[in-house]
Amino acid sequence: MFAAIQPRRLYRQVADQIRTLIESGEFAVGERLPGERELAEKLGVSRPTIREALIALEVEELVHIRMGSGIYVTRQQRAKPAPVQAEAEDLEGPFELLRARALIECAIAEEAAKAITPVHVDALDDVLTKMASTFNDPRTSIALDRTFHTTIAGIIENAALNRFVGELFDQRMTPYFEKLASYFESPASWREAFEEHRAIRDAIASGDPARAKSAMQHHLLQSQLRFSKSFDEELESEKGHPAGGRSRSTKI
C-alpha cells in the first residue's frame, strides 16, 4: 500500500519547476528563459544547481542551450518520455560528482605520496606520455584520464578505493555529464588538464603528502571551474543586466 518516500536531488526539483512552467505555456516555444543568475536568485539555489537542471532539461529536449546567447524553449510537451527519464532519479549531477571526487581523491593523493616507488612513477609517466598526444581525441583523453586517477589510487594498494575511484569517474559518462562536457571540453581544456596531471605526478613523486593533496585539489577545482562558465555570460555582462526573457512576476 505504501511506497518509501525518496529524497529527490535538488537539481531534479529545479528541473521539475522549470519543466512545469514550460509545459503550462508560461514560457513559449522559442522564448529565452531567464538567465542562470536570475534563476538561481529566484529559486534560492546555487548556479551549479541551475546549470545541472538546465542540462537535464536539454537532455529531455525541452530546451536548447546557445552558448553566449542563453537557454531557449524548444517544445512544451514531450511526445514520449525521454530515454533517460526512467533512470533520472539515480543520476548524480556533474558538479555533485566533481565535489565528491575532490573530497576522496585529495586524500588518496596524500596517501599515495607516502607510498610512492619508482615503479609507480614509471606507471604515471607512461599514462602522461600517452595523454600528451590525445588532446584532439576526447574519448581517448577521457580513458587515459581515468587510468591516471585509478593508477594513483592503486599506489596505496587498497582494492576498494581503487574500484571506487574508477566507478566514480565512470559516472561522468552519464547523458548529463556528457552534454555539459560537450560545451566546455576542447583541446585547450585537455591541455590544461594535462599540465595539472603533470603537477600531481610531480607532487606525488616528490613524496610530499601536503603538496600532492594540494595539486589534486587544484586540479579538481579547475575541473569544476572549466564547467562553470555561464551559458549566457555575454548577455549577463551587458550593462550589468541579467540575461532573460521578458520581465515576469511569475514565481519559480
Image: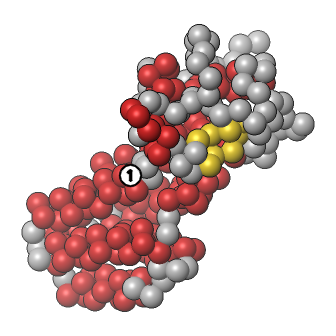
Q: Nearer the viewer, residue 73 or 158?
A: 73
Q: What residue lies at 31% left-to-right and 53% top-to-bottom?
A: 221
Q: Amino acid at mark 1?
A: Gln
- Say if 16 sits above or below 97 in the image: above
Where's residue 172, x and y in %? 53, 56
Quadrant in the rendering for residue 147: bottom left
Q: Quadrant of the N terminus?
A: top right
Q: What residue lies at 20% left-to-right and 87% top-to-bottom?
A: 118
Q: Nearer the viewer, residue 12 or 47?
A: 47
Where's residue 158, x and y in %? 33, 64
Q: Using residue 232 as the reference point, say whether residue 25 is left or right of it.
A: right
Where's residue 103, x and y in %? 30, 48
- Say if 90 sits above or below 200 in the image: above
- Say if 122 sits above or below 148 in the image: below
Q: Using residue 72 as the reference point, say whether residue 211 is left or right of it.
A: left
Q: Please tell me how crowded label 1 is: few (under 14), some (14-19), or many (20+) other residues with Cα within 10 Å.
A: some
Q: Residue furthest right?
A: 79
Q: What residue lies at 49% left-to-right and 40% top-to-bottom?
A: 235
Q: Nearer the viewer, residue 212 or 35?
A: 35
- Say if 96 sits above or below 1 in the image: below
